[in-house]
């Protein structure tokens, strides 16, 4: 075998070992995802049960049912992937069993040959003659050693056969477990397909029932869009005002630092009631008195200036993209961010400035990250919305019936901020969760932990 062939064989063996080592991790990942999907289906079942207490179909029930079907379909796909992994393991196990059986047969054949040879020379006189017929003493010693080694080798051969037999029994037991595991997964998949069929039937029934009120869909969507736009405009105004205040504070901090650099003493020469214009004059006078060159007033910054602490908080928030806690303990997203078609009519589109998460009645909203409450919005006839600041990021939590905190409070991650409003007509409990960066809307869903 040349050097290239050896290298190729080594690479193939190493790749095979690497793939085998990855199998348990992949299987564990798939099983973990199955548990998570089953939990999400259970959450959807509870939300559906509450939404249907009044025996009427509702849009939130349809949206929850749609999500439940999506979870069920993904669960079936996940089971399929695990079945494929197990089939691959079974194939490898069957090959290992065949190789062990062949190896045991070879060992047994070799051992049988040794027994026949031993039987042919079984008498003590034959062994003695074998030693005595040596040409010299050294050869006689070597023949004695050979006879001993031959006897030891026979014993080793017996031990090797027993070890391989034990390993074969272990491999067969593992193979049987894999056959059983595969059969259990197939049964689970069949059960999930049965549930999926029932859910799709339920989905069509719900759609048919809701389509009886289709004539008012456009009015409902227009009304909801107007409410969402009004709320979002108010949120945008509040965030823009907060950004403007941050810039004013940054400008003031920079101006006071220039005053100190010019030799002015805070609390004596100026204080927080001294206007910016007056402070500029004092700086100019102080520099002229010291014969220092007159400096130009720095241009106003258009960037979102933050204190070092706030900037650090913003960086920490950004670093947690994809792992932020959900704004509810348990829930499912029933409406995504951006332009979303209506579940009953794809021609009707709503521009959603946040995501909507359905949960159970009595649930609380919680802070997705540490930060400061900058505003609590109470529009007439509508639920409460709370806005938090996290450096240059902002989150808002809408559709609350009450809040436990007040403006200016410093909140910790996962701290409860209020109770989510439950619509008494449809028994739906949905929190609106929105995200802004530097005054620009972002899709909050990719920021949340899976």
Image (cartoon, helix red, strand yellow):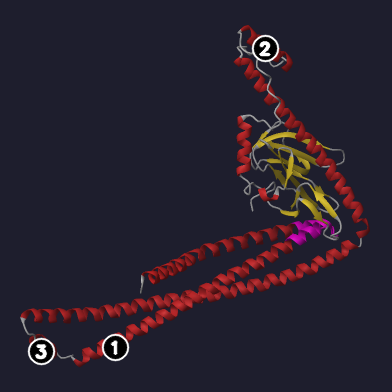
Q: Which residues are magenta?
A: 47-67
Front tag of 3 and 2: 2
Specify whether residue 293 is painted magenta: no
Quick one: label 1, few (<14), some, or many (20+) residues within 10 Å?
few
Number of numbered callouts drawn: 3
Say whether residue 328 is left or right of residue 101. Answer: right
Front tag of 2 and 1: 2
Quick one: label 2, few (<14), some, or many (20+) residues within 10 Å?
some
Q: Residue furthest left?
A: 136
Q: Residue furthest bottom?
A: 120
Q: Is residue 443 above or below residue 48?
A: above
- Helix, strand or loop under label 2: helix
Residue ID at (25%, 91%): 116
Q: Which residue is mark 2?
A: 284
Q: Is residue 37 above or below residue 339?
A: below
From mark 2 to mark 1, how far is it between C-alphas?
Answer: 110 Å
- Helix, strand or loop under label 1: helix
**Is residue 268 visible from the viewing direction of this image?**
no
From mark 3 to mark 1, how far is it between C-alphas?
Answer: 24 Å
Image position, residue 213 (x, y; %): 91, 59
């Amino acid at each position: 075998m040349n050097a290239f062939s050896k290298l190729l064989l080594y690479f193939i063996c190493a790749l095979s070992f690497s793939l085998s080592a990855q199998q348990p991790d992949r299987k564990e990942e798939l099983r973990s995802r199955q548990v998570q999907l089953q939990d999400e289906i259970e959450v959807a079942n509870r939300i559906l049960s509450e939404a249907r207490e009044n025996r009427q179909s509702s849009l939130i029930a349809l949206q929850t049912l749609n999500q439940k079907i999506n979870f069920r379909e993904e669960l079936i796909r996940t089971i399929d992937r695990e079945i494929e992994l197990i089939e691959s393991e079974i194939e490898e196990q069957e090959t290992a069993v065949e190789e062990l059986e062949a190896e045991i047969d070879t060992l047994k054949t070799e051992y049988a040959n040794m027994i026949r040879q031993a039987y042919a020379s079984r008498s003590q006189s034959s062994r003695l003659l074998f030693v005595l017929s040596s040409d010299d003493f050294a050869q006689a010693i070597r023949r004695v050693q050979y006879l001993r080694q031959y006897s030891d080798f026979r014993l080793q051969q017996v031990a090797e056969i027993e070890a391989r037999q034990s390993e074969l029994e272990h491999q067969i037991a593992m193979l049987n477990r894999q056959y059983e595991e595969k059969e259990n997964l197939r049964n689970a998949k069949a059960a999930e397909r049965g549930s999926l069929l029932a859910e799709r039937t339920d989905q069509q029934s719900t759609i048919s029932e809701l389509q009886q009120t289709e004539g008012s869909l456009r009015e409902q969507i227009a009304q909801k869009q107007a409410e969402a736009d009004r709320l979002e405009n108010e949120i945008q105004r509040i965030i823009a005002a907060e950004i403007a205040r941050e810039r004013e504070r940054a400008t003031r901090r920079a101006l006071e630092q220039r005053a100190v650099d010019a030799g002015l003493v805070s609390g004596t020469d100026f204080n927080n009631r001294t206007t910016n214009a007056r402070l500029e004059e004092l700086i100019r006078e102080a520099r002229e008195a010291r014969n220092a060159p007159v400096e130009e007033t720095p241009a106003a910054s258009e960037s979102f200036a933050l204190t070092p602490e706030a900037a650090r908080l913003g960086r920490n928030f950004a670093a947690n993209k994809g792992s932020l806690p959900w704004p509810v303990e348990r829930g499912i997203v029933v409406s995504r961010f951006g332009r979303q078609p209506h579940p009953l009519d794809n021609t009707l589109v709503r521009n959603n400035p946040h995501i909507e998460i359905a949960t159970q009645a009595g649930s609380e909203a919680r802070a997705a990250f540490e930060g400061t409450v900058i505003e609590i919005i109470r529009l007439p006839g509508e639920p409460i919305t709370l806005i938090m600041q996290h450096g240059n990021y902002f989150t808002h939590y809408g559709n609350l019936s009450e809040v436990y905190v007040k403006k200016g409070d410093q909140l910790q991650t996962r701290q409860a901020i209020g109770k989510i409003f439950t619509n008494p007509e449809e028994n739906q409990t949905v929190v609106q969760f929105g995200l802004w960066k530097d005054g620009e809307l972002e899709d909050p869903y990719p920021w949340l932990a899976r």
